[in-house]
Image (cartoon, helix red, strand yellow):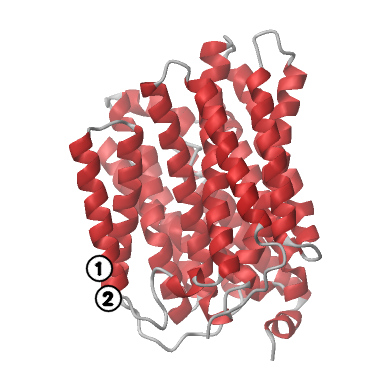
């Protein structure tokens, strides 16, 4: 029986509850990546910590999530995506309670690490589960829902944080996840579908090497961005190469932790490359723009934040339409058009001055978001649909890992430009446009490629 037929057999009410479970977990995991940013000054004051120490509240969550995506995706292939998702949701909920009950920066950072592990459990199998919730001919629409929620959660994170902080202490930024998590867990336990289980054993050594390689790679990229010195950068780079070589040497050939089998599929590898470049371009521009709007153009933080909302809001609104279109059109063509629009939008931001009307600035930002949204859903659909059914977890984990690598590279580019150049805003927008243009060319190379799966 085909996947499409099995998913058609899923009762419509169960399908709705299952997708609600998946997107609620996604919304919490994505929002918690940024929701604490606004509260960092008050958290630091309450806990008598420095601003630098408070940054670990953000970094500990992101790092823990990044290093666990591929190992947990691989484990999901063996024990079931449903089980990994529910355990991740449970850990995320309990860790949120621990975050809200913390009294020191150390306690809060440790709780955030656990919360990151839980978020990784959900995000590592997020797209893989969707493949078993919806039939194949509706997969693009389902991925569009996913992108819509992710974009909305990103846009609403600062707004939700501001609303909570206006009526309660920062503790409730985390405690609010507890009742929501309990309800979603109960619904997910009853509605999430089972998936076929792989027969191979879990490779603990490969998992450890994979976590070390991703962690060292992200640290190397961050060290370059912050100009930590040639010795430190070279040491990190050498360590990364060494650990990756060990991983490639010892991981099993039939179901590798680092999915080299999937990377041999041209359509998959081109999609991953496109994803990394495009997320680097978007993140570089989006991280730099608050500095540009506030320091160069003299806008207030509230004013700049309101304008910037146009970008993720446009991503969210476009993603659902693009997802539906990807069920009928080539992802390479849709992605290429979207990334071309993103490139033009980034170049148009070079013309923004202090005299530019707010409406025109918001339109430029919305054009960028529209272009990225047109690319994201079709690209995600392609990556999950070309993978063999039993490798859905690896594809889902690779999707999340590629996104985080692109985001880390983009943020590091901003840090490098702010430190090393006298005109960082222009440099970053030009680099982002070049990356987006390169991603556009890579995406167009996918037009006409068949989803060849290696035997």
Q: CA distance from mark 1 to mark 2?
A: 6 Å
Q: Is residue 149 visible?
A: yes
Specify the label residue 306 is tagged with. none
Numbered disc 1: secondary structure: helix
- The image quarter in which residue 347 lies: top right
In this rendering, the answer to whether 373 lies above or below 346 is below
In the picture provided, is 26 more to the left or to the right than 326? left
Q: Is residue 310 visible?
A: no
Task: Please name whichever residue, 345 or 179, is drawn nearer the observer in this view of the structure.
Answer: 345
Q: Residue 396, position in %: x, y?
A: 53, 65
Q: Residue 45, position in %: x, y?
A: 33, 23
Task: Please name whichever residue, 80 or 136, is drawn nearer the observer in this view of the structure.
Answer: 136
Residue at coordinates 56% horizontally, 28% vertically from top-left?
A: 429
In the picture provided, is 363 more to the left or to the right than 106? right
Q: Residues within 10 Å of mark 2 (few under 14, many from 20)?
A: few
Q: Residue 424, position in %: x, y?
A: 47, 21
C-beta proximity under 8 Å, tags 1 and 2 = yes
Residue at coordinates 54% horizontally, 19% vertically from top-left?
A: 292
Specify the label residue 246 is tagged with. 1
In the picture provided, is 283 more to the left or to the right than 330? left
- The image quarter in which residue 13 lies: bottom right
Numbered disc 2: secondary structure: helix
Q: Which residue is mark 2?
A: 250
In this rendering, the answer to whether 370 lies above or below 81 is above
In this rendering, the answer to whether 440 lies above or below 155 is below
Residue at coordinates 77% horizontally, 73% vertically from top-left?
A: 137
Q: Residues within 10 Å of mark 1 (few under 14, many from 20)?
A: some
């Amino acid at each position: 029986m085909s996947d499409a037929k099995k998913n058609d057999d899923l009762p419509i009410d169960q399908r709705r509850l299952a997708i609600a479970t998946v997107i609620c977990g996604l919304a919490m995991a994505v929002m918690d990546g940024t929701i604490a940013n606004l509260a960092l000054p008050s958290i630091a004051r309450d806990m008598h910590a420095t601003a630098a120490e408070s940054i670990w509240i953000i970094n500990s969550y992101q790092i823990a999530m990044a290093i666990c995506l591929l190992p947990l995706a691989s484990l999901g292939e063996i024990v079931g995506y449903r089980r990994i998702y529910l355990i991740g949701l449970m850990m995320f909920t309990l860790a949120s309670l621990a975050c809200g009950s913390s009294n020191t920066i150390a306690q809060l950072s440790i709780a955030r690490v656990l919360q990151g592990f839980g978020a990784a459990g959900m995000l590592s199998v997020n797209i893989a589960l969707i493949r078993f919730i919806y039939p194949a001919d509706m997969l693009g629409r389902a991925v569009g829902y996913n992108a819509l929620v992710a974009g909305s959660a990103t846009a609403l994170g600062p707004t939700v944080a501001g609303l909570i902080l206006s009526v309660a202490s920062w503790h409730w930024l985390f405690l609010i996840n507890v009742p929501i998590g309990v309800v979603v867990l109960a619904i997910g336990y009853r509605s999430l579908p089972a998936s076929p289980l792989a027969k191979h054993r879990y490779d603990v050594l490969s998992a450890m090497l994979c976590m070390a390689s991703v962690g060292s790679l992200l640290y190397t990229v961050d060290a370059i961005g912050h100009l930590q010195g040639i010795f430190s950068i070279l040491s990190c780079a050498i360590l990364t190469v060494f650990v990756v070589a060990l991983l490639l040497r010892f991981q099993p050939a039939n179901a590798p932790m680092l999915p080299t089998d999937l990377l041999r599929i041209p359509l998959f590898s081109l999609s991953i490359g496109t994803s990394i470049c495009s997320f680097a371009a978007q993140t570089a521009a989006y991280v730099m723009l608050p500095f540009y709007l506030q320091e160069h153009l003299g806008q207030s933080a509230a004013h700049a934040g309101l304008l910037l909302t146009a970008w993720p809001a446009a991503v969210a609104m476009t993603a659902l339409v693009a997802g539906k279109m990807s069920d009928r059109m080539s992802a390479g063509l849709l992605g290429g058009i979207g990334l071309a629009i993103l490139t033009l939008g980034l170049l148009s931001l070079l013309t923004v001055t202090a005299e530019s009307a707010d409406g025109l600035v918001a339109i430029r930002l919305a054009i960028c978001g529209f272009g990225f949204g047109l690319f994201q859903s079709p690209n995600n659909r392609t990556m999950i649909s070309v993978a063999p059914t039993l490798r859905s977890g690896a594809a889902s984990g690779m999707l999340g890992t590629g996104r985080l690598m692109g985001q880390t590279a983009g943020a590091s580019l901003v840090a490098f430009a702010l430190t090393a150049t006298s005109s960082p805003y222009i440099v970053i927008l030009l680099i982002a446009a070049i990356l987006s243009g390169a991603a556009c060319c890579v995406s167009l190379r996918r037009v006409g490629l068949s989803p060849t799966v290696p035997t």
